[in-house]
Image: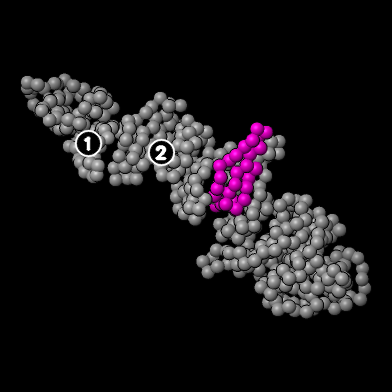
């Protein structure tokens, strides 16, 4: 601005000068040049400390536009926004850096509607904008919270609530088009049809370990609810988590979870891209009742439910993952994923599986010799070899029709002596000695739709699904 003239104030911080006029003030520094401050912006600038405040010297003229009209003027360390009919607000520091990285006025947040508020818990600051807020917290970072997640966050107490401050930006494009955002002590999820809910604490840790929304449970559909005894529960799209004091987390899935779990990669055992995957799932390890669901691969590679039934597993329930079922008289069903390639019975009902028609000499090897866990024929009937003809023709007609589940046998694995044999899918819907049993009509439906290489996944939900 040259030598000082009447009305000028020079010697300001950084060697600058300023001079007031009827409709504004001009501020000059060698680093920034001469810049005009309109009356509305000038008042807010002076209130913020002028050249000695956070904003320091202006960098350019104000730019105005939009509806309502918003005027923005940039300064060395931030900007001032004058919103017609609402007020003039500075945005600076870490919050300004995040705001600008998100597009500033043209971004989703829109214009500021309040000044930055600091002195929050942990030395944090926040500033509200047209469609959300930005939070700065030492050790957590600076992140916006907006939209449906912001509404839920505020309903839960915002930064003063259990969740604390955001530790990451909202991430969208998740399973089914959902979104989530991480906070200091939990996460909020949004998904169309599921709503917007938070998951935290012990249930939240378990949920995250099980692949969160990409796992078998899907998105949360209710908030966590607890009682005075410390029991807590939360419902999800495909099941429920329960916190039981002294026990930990109980994991419950609905059968509707099984097929989507293949599509999302939430099945712990490989399914091999099979055209059909059938599940035989129990709730607990001592349970003999199973839910049987068959899923069919769709043209896009996802899986959809074809049909379902109720059945039974071994009288001792399922063996744990990786644990051999042992001799049949231990009455455990194996846990795992197995192919199906062969069927048997008194007459082919129309299956595409390789089919063996039984006769009075049909046996399945249980003795520890070359016939172990294989079909063979013999006139002798020596335990623990199974007389398949007897089980096919007795009144309960267990083996009138059956399918070989390739546990402890090729093509899935080499045969290991005494690791378990004769694991079939058969009729007579009662607890078994290790097989899976269904009603006759359901067994026939399976046979008529099965193809070689289809998969059979069986076990307890907790250890089958993420």
Label 1 residue SS: strand
Q: List the residue tagged with mark 2.
A: 143
Spot occupied by residue 395 in the image (x, y as percentages of width and height): 87, 71
In the image: residue 264, left or right of residue 33:
right
Q: Earlier in the sequence, mark 1 or mark 2?
A: 1
Q: Nearer the viewer, residue 209 or 47?
A: 47
Q: Residue at x 48, y 48 (%)?
A: 190
Using the rendered view, name the quadrant where residue 282 is placed.
bottom right
Across and down, in percent, residue 86 comes to: 27, 35
Q: Label 2 neighbourhood size at 10 Å, few (<14), some (14-19), many (20+)?
A: many
Question: What crowding class fits label 1: few (fewer than 14 Cα within 10 Å), some (14-19), or many (20 or more)?
Answer: many
- Per the rendered image, the range of residues in magenta is 214-242
Mark 1 = which residue? 73
Given residues 159 and 122, the one toward you in this image is: 159
Q: Is residue 453 left or right of residue 432?
A: left
Total marks placed: 2
Report whether residue 101 is seen: no
Q: Which residue is pictured at 70% across the width and 79% down the height?
A: 350
The answer to whether 37 is drawn above or below residue 294 in the figure is above
Residue 167 picture location, percent across and down = 46, 38
Label placed on residue 100: none
Residue 446 highlighted magenta (yes or no)? no
């Amino acid at each position: 601005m040259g030598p000082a003239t009447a009305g000028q104030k020079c010697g300001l911080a950084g060697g600058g000068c300023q001079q007031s006029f009827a409709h504004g003030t001009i501020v000059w520094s060698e680093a920034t040049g001469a810049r005009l401050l309109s009356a509305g912006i000038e008042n807010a600038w002076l209130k913020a400390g002028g050249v000695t405040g956070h904003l320091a010297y202006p960098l350019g003229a104000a730019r105005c536009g939009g509806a309502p009209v918003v005027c923005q003027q940039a300064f060395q360390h931030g900007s001032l926004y004058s919103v017609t009919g609402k007020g003039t607000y500075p945005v600076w520091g870490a919050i300004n850096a995040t705001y600008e990285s998100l597009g500033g006025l043209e971004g989703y947040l829109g214009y500021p509607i309040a000044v930055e508020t600091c002195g929050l818990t942990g030395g944090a600051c926040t500033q509200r904008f047209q469609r959300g807020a930005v939070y700065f917290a030492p050790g957590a970072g600076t992140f916006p919270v907006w939209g449906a997640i912001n509404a839920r966050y505020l309903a839960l107490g915002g930064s003063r609530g259990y969740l604390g401050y955001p530790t990451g930006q909202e991430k969208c494009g998740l399973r089914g088009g959902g979104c989530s955002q991480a906070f200091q002590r939990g996460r909020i999820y949004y998904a169309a049809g599921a709503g917007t809910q938070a998951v935290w604490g012990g249930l939240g840790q378990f949920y995250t370990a099980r692949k969160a929304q990409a796992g078998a449970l899907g998105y949360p559909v209710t908030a966590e609810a607890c009682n005075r005894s410390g029991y807590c529960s939360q419902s999800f799209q495909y099941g429920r988590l329960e916190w039981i004091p002294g026990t930990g987390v109980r994991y419950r899935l609905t059968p509707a979870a099984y097929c989507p779990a293949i599509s999302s990669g939430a099945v712990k055992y490989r399914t091999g891209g099979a055209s059909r995957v059938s599940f035989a799932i129990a709730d607990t390890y001592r349970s003999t009742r199973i839910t049987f669901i068959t899923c069919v691969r769709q043209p896009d590679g996802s899986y959809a439910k074809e049909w379902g039934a109720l059945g039974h597993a071994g009288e001792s329930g399922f063996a744990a993952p990786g644990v051999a079922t042992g001799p049949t008289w231990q009455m455990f069903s194996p846990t795992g994923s197995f192919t199906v390639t062969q069927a048997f019975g008194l007459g082919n009902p129309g299956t595409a599986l390789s089919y063996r028609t039984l006769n009075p000499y049909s046996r399945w090897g249980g003795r520890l010799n070359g016939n172990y866990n294989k079909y063979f024929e013999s006139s002798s009937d020596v335990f623990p070899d199974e007389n398949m003809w007897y089980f096919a023709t007795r009144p309960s007609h267990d083996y009138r029709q059956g399918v070989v589940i390739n546990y402890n046998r090729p093509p899935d694995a080499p045969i290991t002596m005494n690791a378990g044999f004769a694991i079939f899918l058969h009729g007579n819907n009662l607890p078994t000695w290790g097989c899976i049993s269904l009603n006759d009509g359901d067994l026939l439906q399976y046979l008529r739709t099965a193809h070689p290489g289809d998969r059979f996944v069986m076990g307890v939900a907790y250890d089958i699904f993420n």
